[in-house]
Image (tube, grey):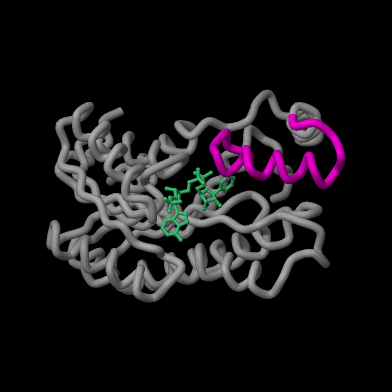
């Protein structure tokens, strides 16, 4: 299916690794020029070199800590300076600690909201004028825990619930300003972040990493965990002209593990 993304400009937060990197590759494959944002310069440079070489597309990077106001200001200014235009914003970066409720500190909660919720709210606000000019698209990456909280996953569940609610509200603003906004909820996706969660969960439960994975697959009753490409394919569709009438929706990518309405 021709997605009609040739020549578009896309900014992907957390575009250096994991889900964000796969989204970056997919959008470049479809003809987009990219701005990738993350904290680690070496990873960004590697991603930009690999994707640029593979697709021939222009790939710019911005090193910024999006958990801070300075970081979101710098990243949005870098996008404006590099391209002067923006068609697609994918707010993907962020993560929260898992753990027993009583072991999580105020700082753990504060940091996770800063790192994901406030980062995407500020990036959306700063780049909204460019997105409005381009009749552009925003996709926010939340997670299924935002609608189905799980033991030991207090923080990500709450942050992702806030992200989903914010995305719906931003979609209302998008109806006024002609910007598409949708939110994607991955279930378990095999990335470094997931490896970290699995290791922490194994330590918490006193079982092996393989046992954690097997338990999770059995509990969800799914065939396999998602790949980063499962998520990237959905995002590429949602930011394309083909999805222009898809507005304010939640796309769950978890192989059928979430059985709520
Ligand atoms: N993996 C899963 O199972 C899963 C499930 C549901 C939802 N999600 C969501 O999907 C998104 C991506 O997850 P992932 O698994 O791909 O994570 P990942 O492999 O850990 O990659 C995270 C990316 O975000 C960047 N990043 C993190 N904090 C940042 C900050 N403060 N400022 C700028 N960049 C930052 C990282 O680069 P630096 O570290 O260099 O900054 C990296 O590029 C997250 O929002 C996560 O909550 C993941």
Q: Residue at x 46, y 39 (%)?
A: 18
Which is nearer the eye, 116 or 200? 200
Picture mark count: 0
23 lies left or right of 231: left
Q: Is residue 197 in the magenta section?
A: yes
Image quadrant containing the N terminus? top left
Q: Residue at x 30, y 72 (%)?
A: 73
Q: Residue at x 14, y 58 (%)?
A: 82
Q: Is residue 85 in the magenta section?
A: no
Q: Which residue sits furthest front?
A: 42
Q: Position of residue 130 (x, y in %)?
A: 21, 66
Q: Say if 60 sits above or below 248 in the image.
A: above
Residue extent of the magenta highlight: 188-209
Which is nearer the eye, 86 or 47? 47
Q: Position of residue 260 (x, y in %)?
A: 72, 49
Which is nearer the eye, 233 or 101? 101
Asked whether residue 89 is in view, the answer is yes
- In which quarter of the view is residue 218 placed? top right
94 lies left or right of 195: left
Q: Position of residue 228 (x, y in %)?
A: 48, 34
């Amino acid at each position: 299916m021709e997605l009609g993304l040739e020549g578009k400009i896309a900014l992907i937060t957390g575009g250096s690794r994991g889900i964000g990197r796969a989204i970056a590759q997919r959008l470049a494959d479809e003809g987009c020029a990219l701005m990738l944002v993350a904290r680690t310069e070496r990873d960004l440079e590697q991603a930009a070199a690999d994707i640029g070489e593979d697709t021939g597309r222009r790939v710019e990077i911005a090193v910024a800590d999006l958990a801070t106001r300075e970081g979101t200001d710098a990243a949005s200014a870098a996008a404006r300076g590099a391209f002067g235009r923006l068609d697609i914003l994918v707010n993907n970066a962020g993560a929260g600690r898992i753990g027993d409720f009583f072991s999580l500190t105020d700082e753990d909660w504060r940091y996770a909201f800063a790192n994901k919720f406030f980062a995407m709210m500020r990036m959306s606000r700063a780049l909204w004028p460019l997105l409005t000019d381009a009749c552009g698209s925003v996709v926010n990456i939340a997670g299924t825990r935002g609608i189905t909280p799980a033991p030991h996953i207090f923080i990500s569940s709450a942050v992702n619930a806030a992200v989903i609610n914010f995305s719906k509200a931003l979609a209302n603003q998008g109806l006024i300003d002609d910007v598409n906004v949708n939110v994607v909820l991955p279930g378990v996706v095999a990335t470094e972040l997931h490896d970290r969660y699995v290791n922490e969960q194994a330590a918490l439960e006193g079982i092996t990493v393989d046992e954690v994975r097997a338990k999770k697959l059995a509990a969800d009753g799914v065939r396999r965990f998602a790949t980063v490409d499962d998520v990237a394919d959905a995002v590429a569709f949602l930011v394309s002209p083909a999805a222009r009438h898809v507005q304010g929706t939640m796309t769950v990518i978890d192989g059928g593990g979430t059985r709520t309405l």
